[in-house]
Amino acid sequence: MRAILLGFLGVFASCSKTRESPCPDFPGGSGWTLALSSPDGNRIDGVLSNVAGRTRIRGVLTTREGAREPLDYAVDSVQMQSDSVHFMFSPSQIRLAGNCVSMDSVRAKFEMPQPPFGPITGSGTITRVKR
């Protein structure tokens, strides 16, 4: 019985260890460039950077009709867990989720509400700005 209990605890302890993120300083550092698009032609192009101690996104949201909305918002609730990244920015309530694939790259998906219709979804990359 003791051997079974010790075996279980060993397996549990090894499963509970978290891996170090491939991009440990996200979203800090020199900034990150977003290049995301939806299948129907909506685009998010911008830069995440640290401004006065807060992460901000600055860029452009382009609709499929070609309208361009400037983005200059604080990023809410950046969450990192292992290689996963999650954040949102307001007032558009755009949510991004991704996986770090290297120190300089995140493969990401976004979701943007579009009431009363379903959300606009898309994907792309977030890459570290090279200086």
Image (tube, rainbow, N blue to C red):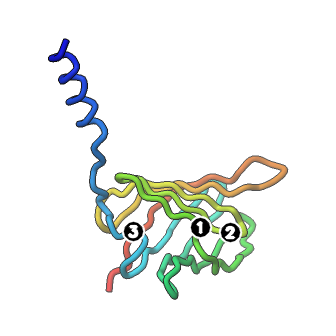
Q: Please tell me whether mark 3 sits on a helix, a strand or a loop.
A: loop
Which residue is drawn at the image coordinates 36% and 79% (left, top)? 29
Between residue 27 and residue 110, name the one nearer to us: 27
Q: Residue furthest top?
A: 1
Which residue is drawn at the image coordinates 33% and 56% (left, top)? 101
Which residue is drawn at the image coordinates 81% and 53% (left, top)? 115
Three-letter residue code for mark 1: Asp
Mark 2 or mark 1, which is nearer to you?
1
Q: Please tell me whether mark 2 sits on a helix, a strand or a loop.
A: loop
Which residue is drawn at the image coordinates 58% and 71% (left, top)? 75
The answer to which of marks 3 and 1 sits earlier in the sequence is 3
Pinpoint residue 93: horizontal percent, then vertical percent. Answer: 69, 62
Three-letter residue code for mark 2: Ser
Mark 2 — residue?
90
Q: Is residue 36 left or right of residue 26?
A: right
Residue contact at pointers 2 and 3, CB within 8 angstroms: no
Quarter residue 76 falls in: bottom right
Mark 3 — residue?
26
Three-letter residue code for mark 3: Phe
Mark 1 — residue?
76
Residue contact at pointers 2 and 1, CB within 8 angstroms: yes
Q: Please tell me whether mark 1 sits on a helix, a strand or a loop.
A: strand
